[in-house]
Amino acid sequence: MIYSILIANRGEIACRIIHTCHKLGIRTVAVYSEADAAARHVQMADTAVHIGPSPASDSYLNIPVIIAAAQRAGADAIHPGFGFLAENADFARACVAAGLVFVGPSPEAMEAMGNKRAAKEMVAAAGIPIIPGYTGADQQDKTLLAAAAHIGFPLMVKAAAGGGGKGMRLVPAAAALPEALAAARHEARQAFGSDELILERALWQPRHVEIQIMGDHHGNLIHLGERECSLQRRHQKVIEEAPSPAVDADLRRRMGETAVRVAQTVNYYNAGTVEFLLDEAGDFYFLEMNTRLQVEHPVTELVTGIDLVAWQLRVAEGGRLPLTQAEVVWQGHAIEARVYAENPANDFLPVTGEVLLWQPPGGMSAAAGIRIDSGIQTGDTVSIHYDPMLAKMIAHGEDRATAVRQLGRALEMTVLLGFSHNLPYLRDILRRPEFQDGRLHTHFLADHFADWQPPDGDVTLALITATIWQFENQPQLPYNQGYWRNNPHWSPLYRYEWGGEVVDVRLTAVARHGQPYHLTLSSQPDKEFTVWLHEQMATTLVLTVDGLRQRVVYVNRDGRWWVQTESGVVHLRQVSLLPAPAPAADAGGSLRAPMPGAVLAVLVEVGQAVTKGQPLMKLEAMKMEHTIRTAGDGVVTAIYYAAGDTVEADAELLKIKAVE
């Protein structure tokens, strides 16, 4: 039996595994890097071991250090979670060699399915349908270019050794292939330690449907139904659900049986997922097999009533599967949304910053069909070192419409303040009629949300909230230094900047003896607002503004306000009433970092002539590579960073002198 387990991971998956272990009476050991010293998974575990600096290569990917941590903490077993070392066969062997139980499949199965090229060849030999493509060992550019010409465009370039969208590029035409190959190789090498690639024909508007399988050491192997994972950005999933709106009982049986056959080719045991592409005609093709627990496993748990982590531990201890295939029952519908620290309106670039306030929907519970898998807490810092996924929000209802409505309400009630994120984007997806009708495919987000912009929050309500709070709590403001008056509580003035506009808010009448406040805004000079303050808490005000009662959540940090209104988050900046002159900004031909990260490569030199669209510099953050390109023709006059340097968001990277 397993009495003590080390979780070789971080964030929400580490917290989720710890939750089940605590239910089973298993002692838990967390590991953490310098960036995660105060992280939630560290606080949840019974004990924790520091494993090194913040970069994953020096901590969460350091096999000897993790094995030593398990031995030092007296663990019997290691659960790898997903990502990092979860599909690393060498790590599984190192665990066994150290006398530790590895909670996962055999190293041989991981190796067989971990290389997409070899896996496709193997399953094709077993009669499993695959997408036409190139899976050869010859990785020369000329060979791949020739194979691509034979396959035809558009096509997919994929890393042979991993998944999760890393090392993956959609190539529309031959001219774009050389750059796509170079970028995919780099990402694959960084993420998986191998730059081997495969090519596949790109199907037109397919669905991404995967089958959860589970096996034990006694030869029992079953499937637990499908998950619809078609909603993706950057080839990474955003929303998943079970069952799929496109799969009926017969197709579920056929896909499930095929997934079991795939797993049988490598004598698979423990949890795994076989992924397929499903075309409009109802034909499905093997895509890959993930030899680990998936991010989206909660939707399967909710519709089957099975704790997959508990089953993983049972299998790792040598036990048999608790159910046969005939005993698996699916009930209701479950849908999951991934919460990312990213800006969907800016090509989904990752963002960093402090979690000033994190409040999951407190009024909803498991009894209402809501589950929150989260690895963050108020006060955390989102860094450049790890994946930008912060949490998962899952709803389970008696049917799809109910689950979608429940998830939408949970997203509306969630508070995440301090930086940009994708919560508004997720809410808008759920409201889209095509989504509600189940008309999904892998290009859905690109087709329907290419020009998406976040909804405007209620700026008026945000200005009123900030003003009332300040008058109640800070009657003498540092922003008003320079003024002196002997009636400080009469008609005070507050100034804010929002979206480049400066707005003055004046309290024309202060609430006294059960009377309301009266305010005017310079942006709406002909209107006076009547405001009642009913309740004040640490991060919440309950206000009635002109007869409409509302609960407003806010954070104030050093003169910056994040105010969550029903229509969206408003970010205000306090402005001094006597502002100091500011130096003029350099508005020359400068190029700035769209995200914080590390410089991978500088592709030009000072004095070099460049043309519109030419690559200048490559940045990497949160496992994603981004290329900085010129907006027009010019000459490079300055370069401020070199390969290996770390840059902050909006840092000036290069300067280009435009051609007259």
Image (tube, grey):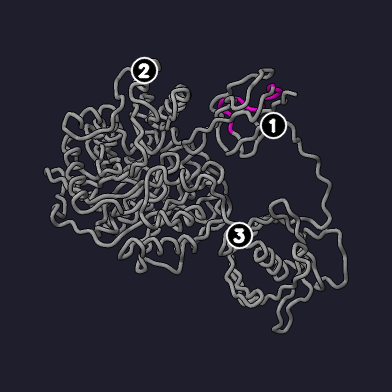
Q: Is residue 449 magenta?
A: no
In the rendered structure, the answer to whether residue 627 lies left or right of residue 107 reads right
Tag 3's secondary structure?
loop
Tag 2's secondary structure?
helix
Q: Amino acid at mark 3?
A: Gly
Q: Amino acid at mark 2?
A: Ala
At 86% from the left and 62% from the top, the residue drawn is 483
Q: Amino acid at mark 1?
A: Ser
The part of the chain drawn in magenta is 635-646
* Quadrant location, the C terminus: top right
Res 97 visible: no
At 71% from the left and 23% from the top, the residue drawn is 637
Circle 1 sits on which residue? Answer: 590
Relative to 636, is 583 above or below?
below
At 51% from the left and 44% from the top, the residue drawn is 450
Are the two marked residues, 3 and 1, in contact with CB atoms closer than 8 angstroms?
no
Q: Residue furthest front?
A: 281
Question: Of the residues tagged 2 and 3, which is closer to the observer?
Answer: 2
In the rendered structure, the answer to whether residue 643 lies left or right of residue 122 reads right
Circle 3 sits on which residue? Answer: 457
Locate residue 132, reporting x and y percent.
28, 29
Relative to 268, is 365 above or below?
below
Q: Which quadrant of the view contains residue 616?
A: top right
Q: Nearer the viewer, residue 618 or 88?
A: 618
Q: Nearer the viewer, residue 615 or 472?
A: 615
Question: Of the residues tagged 2 and 1, which is closer to the observer?
Answer: 2
